[in-house]
Amino acid sequence: MSSTTQKQIQGFVTQNAIYIVLVVLIIGIALYDTHFLSITTLRDILLQSSTRAIIALGAAFVLITGGTDLSAGRVVGLTAVISASMLQAQDYPRRFFPDLPDLPLLVPILIAIAAGVLVGLINGIIVSRFSVPPFIATLGTMVIVYGVNSIYFDMEPNQSQPIGGLRQDFGHLGTGFIGPSGPYSVPYIVIIAIAVAFLVWVVFNKTRLGKNMYAIGGNIQAATVSGINVAWNLMIIYAIAGGLYGLGGVLESARTGGATNNYGNMYELDAIAACVVGGVSTSGGIGTVPGVLAGVLIFGVINYGLTFIGVNPYWQLIIKGLIIVAAVAFDIRKYLAKK
């Protein structure tokens, strides 16, 4: 084999490593149990991965700018509780708001997403206007949001009881299907996730905000000198990320049929891990929507597939951790090679 061919193969593997890992995982599990390749299994993986994908896409916005958002999981919990508390069935005996009439489905959803946007905007202001490092800024808001959510969740008459009895139309959003009944029906939540992914791809690749986002992550000083309003762009980016976390929280509540103030715990780490594994650089300036989705699917396959074949959950954590460390090490090597 010539050196040119070897370089071409090495380049192909480097550029498509994430997809190769995903295919190898699927093949490996399928060889152990061929039932893993059924349409029903694929649909279940997509169903479980849909909300995680939306949250990870929100985290990708921040990571590409060179930041980190630790508040994502708590925003998911806040918005899940807000939407669930306002969308309970009238005949449910333990309603969060006993006298609240049935609201149009879209109203509580928009209120919850707006709460996520507000938290994201606050993060953006703290980072851009007060020059607080994103890790510290979002660590602080993570704790604050959890406290606010817990106070709201503990209000009379709920008193920190799990919120259930959700309206049928809201639950249908998270568990319903489009198309004829059977294995080929497509969950609504998957369609929503695909639509969100397409919109995010458009923002990343076809808008000025997307170009500015990559420029800020690549070199913030050069972006400032080139005339980009870094502070304004960061506020918008963090606000969009918060809105996506909010949508993820709403759909997670609809999918699971309830909510507590502990919803979303550690989701931010899963989102960041999926982004990093999917090729979003920890140094900023690099990342794609297909890569993020592939990262989410890898962890979806690990969680579902290894459980499917009976692997101990503790071994699953070890495998996930090894993949994350390998992905970051690979990313840093590429970054140093470029320098």
Image (cartoon, rainbow, N blue to C red):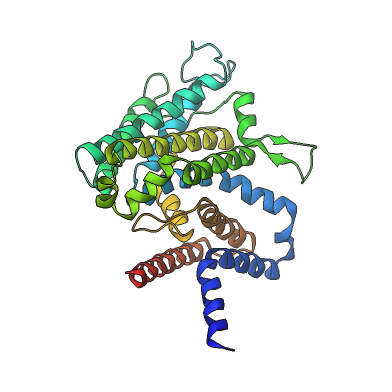
Q: Residue at x 55, y 59 (%)?
A: 298
Q: Residue furthest left?
A: 130
Please, which residue is most extreme toward the front here? 226
Q: Does 254 sit left or right of 33 as displayed?
A: left
Residue 245 makes an appearance in the image: yes
**Residue 312 location, x and y as percent?**
54, 64
* Left or right position of 106 against 225: right
Q: Residue at x 60, y 42 (%)?
A: 194
> Which quarter of the figure has residue 321?
bottom left
In front of the other: 331 or 274 = 331
Q: Position of residue 277 (x, y in %)?
A: 47, 60
Whether residue 296 is situated above or below residue 106 in the rendered picture:
below
Number of marks in the rendered image: 0
Q: Is residue 133 above or below residue 20?
A: above
Give the image location of residue 154, x and y in percent: 36, 26
Residue 160, placed above or below residue 302: above
Q: Quadrant of residue 102?
A: top right
Task: Please give left or right for residue 188 compared with residue 166 in the image.
Answer: right
